[in-house]
Amino acid sequence: MALPVPHENKVTIALDAMGGDHGVDVVVPAALRSLELHPDSLDLILVGDEGLLRTALEAAGHADSPHLMIRHASQAVEMGESPSQALRLKKDSSMRVAIDCVKQGKADACVSAGNTGALMATSRYVLKTLPGIDRPAIITTIPSRGGYTRMLDLGANVDCSAEHLFQFAVMGSVLAEALDGMKEPRVGLLNIGEEEIKGNDQVKQAARILAASELNYQGYVEGDDVFRGTVDVVVCDGFVGNVALKSSEGVASLIAYYMREEFQRNLLTRFAGLVAMPVLKRLRRRTDPRRYNGASLLGLRGIVVKSHGGADRIAFSTAIETAILEAAKGVPTMIDQRLDRMFSERQEP
Amino acid sequence: MALPVPHENKVTIALDAMGGDHGVDVVVPAALRSLELHPDSLDLILVGDEGLLRTALEAAGHADSPHLMIRHASQAVEMGESPSQALRLKKDSSMRVAIDCVKQGKADACVSAGNTGALMATSRYVLKTLPGIDRPAIITTIPSRGGYTRMLDLGANVDCSAEHLFQFAVMGSVLAEALDGMKEPRVGLLNIGEEEIKGNDQVKQAARILAASELNYQGYVEGDDVFRGTVDVVVCDGFVGNVALKSSEGVASLIAYYMREEFQRNLLTRFAGLVAMPVLKRLRRRTDPRRYNGASLLGLRGIVVKSHGGADRIAFSTAIETAILEAAKGVPTMIDQRLDRMFSERQEP
């Protein structure tokens, strides 16, 4: 399979229309929103139950659009389904068919809000990893003081060697260059500052490889640095990254809960809440996780974007936006070229 | 060395007065505050430079107090100093002497805001671990919807076996019983939900040991559960725990930063901020990390409490509060008895 080339002018994205908590009810409105945002440069393939899709499109008054195609798939991967089962038994699932579209060159990228494990396993099986990449990784953007930080891996790999962490750093760096137009993204390795000799063996060894590489490696960072914007790309294994991400979501939601409680305490605080409403709304918009929806599966020979399972229309179309950007830049090809160059440099005496 | 017995009526706490970012300037006022809170049931030993301590006490108008002793120590462990160096070269440091007070039975517990690595290494060297405990762990309380959650390990151990995780669970459970008066604290094992077969080998094996134990084991929890109050005790290895804790601090501080920015945007938002001030102050109080200061080093044959290095007077006296409670209950003895009982049960056919 040829690697995707950049599509600056026009991209086609396949959408797993049955995935996530809301399936068609979210994917169809999100698709229509994305088409409004890109009236001339975007084609979408809605993959899923044709009847359901037609009904949803008619209900939305968009029965016919030259930029919307429907591709029927007879099955759907359940949210709790095991990845191996999905891979073995759901060969005509909306998820699988959407990924097949990428493999066959019918789409430049695909987006799914389905089960992460199944999406990763299926993508890896269908698309394969890039030469030099042992394992794909999941990357997303996280808000920080300076803007945002990209962090990987977020759960695809629970035990990572130093070499894996290095590969993640290369992929994250390329993505930041491609999508954010950064010249030399600052890369940090997630570690802790408490242990006598910092960190575990994998991290320490990865630090040595990174320091000797051409990447703009800044050294160790700690959990709070992710949100401080100390670096542009934070590298860690998938267990740590997943826990960090989920913990952060937990804190944000706890603070929001406290805030609601405090403003609803009595008449006076309710009034204060009313006065502060516009400010609180802006704050909510800034911390709105929907603005950061869309994690990329990096290291594959194709572009796959994972939307949060509970994503709404806005959030899902943010994930489509990520896919469009990656397709426009040809991210897998960029990663491939970078790996190729770095690998040949490492081989030289 | 005999294990500390409960001291319900009167406890003596040794304070490393030179540790942390502020040393004497924080420890002395914090000590005076704690004595005000416990006028008849607390004795404090201030360990550090005698001259500095006398000056600070005189300045505070407390040159003489029957509940305050000074124990001179000629050295201080620096915040960046390596634990092994501190252990080898700083035998008369305020940290070491405070721990020695516990070892010698002169104090029921000690509190230090010094370098965590040095505190852990020195405590372990001087006090030794309890029988059946391979490695001490660091535990702290984390705010959650229901109140708070206790979480360990937070950075003492970067690579943990299943057996270590099990020991952490026992220690955390005993602490929750002792300090919070819980009957059967709910224990959760931190894991991720993304991988085909969840988690890594250590976590999976620990889950089996926990399920077969007498602990009130509730199964896997994810990062956001820590703040949701799903369980009372969350168990994880020190790398993951440290990153989760630091990430959470990072998010909380990012949200506070956003909030300040939003309320200072213009005259109108400043006015809204003024009106909402009492509510925001209550919110700040609820999320104030000083209320949660004081991490315990568990698994030692004595009580050692670690205060945050940057702690102020209030925060440091919160850490003293934790030490008082643990001393009053005789936490190491409770852990020892529990381990003894569980171990003999596991040995039986």
Image (cartoon, coloured by chain):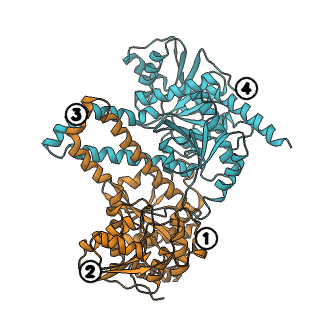
Chain colours: A orange, B cyan
Q: Which mark is residue B2?
A: 4
Q: CA distance from mark 1 to mark 4?
A: 57 Å
Q: Which mark is residue A41?
A: 2
Name the secondary structure under disc 2: loop
- Residue at (48, 43) in percent of width and height: B228
- Give residue B131's position: percent from left, percent from top: 74, 37
Mark 1 or mark 3, earlier in chain: 1
Q: Residues within 10 Å of mark 4 (few under 14, many from 20)?
A: few
Mark 2 or mark 3, earlier in chain: 2
Q: CA distance from mark 4 to mark 2?
A: 77 Å
> Is residue A349 at least partly visible in the picture?
no
* Left or right: B244, with A7 as reference point: right
Q: Going by the picture, which residue comes out furthest to the left? A: B267
Mark 2 or mark 1, earlier in chain: 2
Q: Tag 2: residue type?
A: Ser
Tell me, yes or no, whether the two marked residues, 1 and 4, touch with CB atoms within 8 Å: no
> Is residue B98 at least partly visible in the picture?
yes
Name the secondary structure under disc 4: loop
Return the residue at label 3. A271
- Residue at (51, 79) in percent of width and height: A346
Q: CA distance from mark 1 to mark 3?
A: 54 Å
* Left or right: B235, with B39 as reference point: right
Q: Quadrant of residue B41?
A: top right
